[in-house]
Image: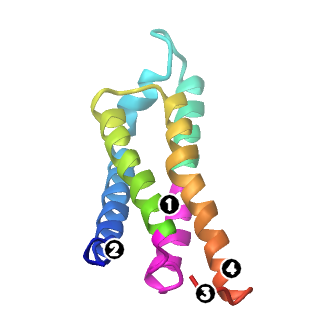
């Protein structure tokens, strides 16, 4: 039982770590946008890639709202399966996004990280919220 009780603070800390890294990518996205472009690029190409990254980061923040809403609202706070899945996904996102920032990875890699580490946990969180609130399931 002691190991299970550590899921709530761990999940909160990992969610916050992922959120902080996403916010820092907003601030330092210039190098990542340039990594997506060929050596000789136009202003239109730069603007297009910058907009693409801003959209991806904005959707990620929207998914954070869904996850924090379910977690802080207490709907999925004590769902052990959702907590473990969320911890694994957001810990993976924190590590890979740190490399994304420091090594200036290509923007196309962000979409893979987004799919597995932001979209998938948000979808499962939504399923848990619907199950608890609409279907009155006990977790």
Question: Magenta stretch?
Answer: 58-80
For disc 2, the marked residue is 4
Do the numbered discs 2 and 3 sit on residues whose CB atoms are within 8 Å? no
Q: Quadrant of residue 2?
A: bottom left
State which tag comes first along the sequence, 3 or 1: 1
Q: Nearer the viewer, residue 132 or 109?
A: 132
State which tag comes first along the sequence, 2 or 3: 2
State which tag comes first along the sequence, 1 or 2: 2
Q: How far apart are the two marked residues, 2 and 3, measured between alpha carbons?
A: 17 Å
Where disc 1 sits, the SS reads: helix
Most extreme residue toward the right, as rendered? 135
For disc 1, the marked residue is 61
Where disc 4 sits, the SS reads: helix
Where disc 2 sits, the SS reads: helix
Most extreme residue toward the front, as rendered? 1
State which tag comes first along the sequence, 2 or 4: 2
For disc 3, the marked residue is 138
The answer to whether residue 30 is left or right of residue 52 is: left
Image mark for residue 131: 4
Q: What residue is rendered at 52% in x and 40% in y?
A: 53
């Amino acid at each position: 039982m002691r190991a299970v009780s550590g899921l709530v603070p761990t999940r909160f800390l990992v969610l916050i770590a992922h959120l902080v890294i996403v916010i820092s990518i907003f601030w330092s996205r210039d190098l990542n946008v340039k990594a997506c472009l060929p050596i000789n690029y136009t202003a239109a190409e730069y603007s297009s890639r910058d907009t693409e990254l801003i959209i991806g980061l904005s959707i990620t923040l929207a998914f954070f709202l869904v996850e924090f809403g379910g977690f802080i609202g207490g709907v999925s706070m004590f769902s052990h399966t959702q907590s473990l899945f969320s911890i694994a996904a957001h810990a993976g996102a924190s590590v890979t996004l740190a490399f994304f920032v420091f090594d200036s990875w290509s923007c196309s890699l962000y979409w893979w990280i987004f799919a597995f580490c932001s979209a998938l946990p948000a979808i499962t969180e939504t399923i848990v919220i619907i199950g608890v609130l609409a279907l009155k399931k006990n977790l």
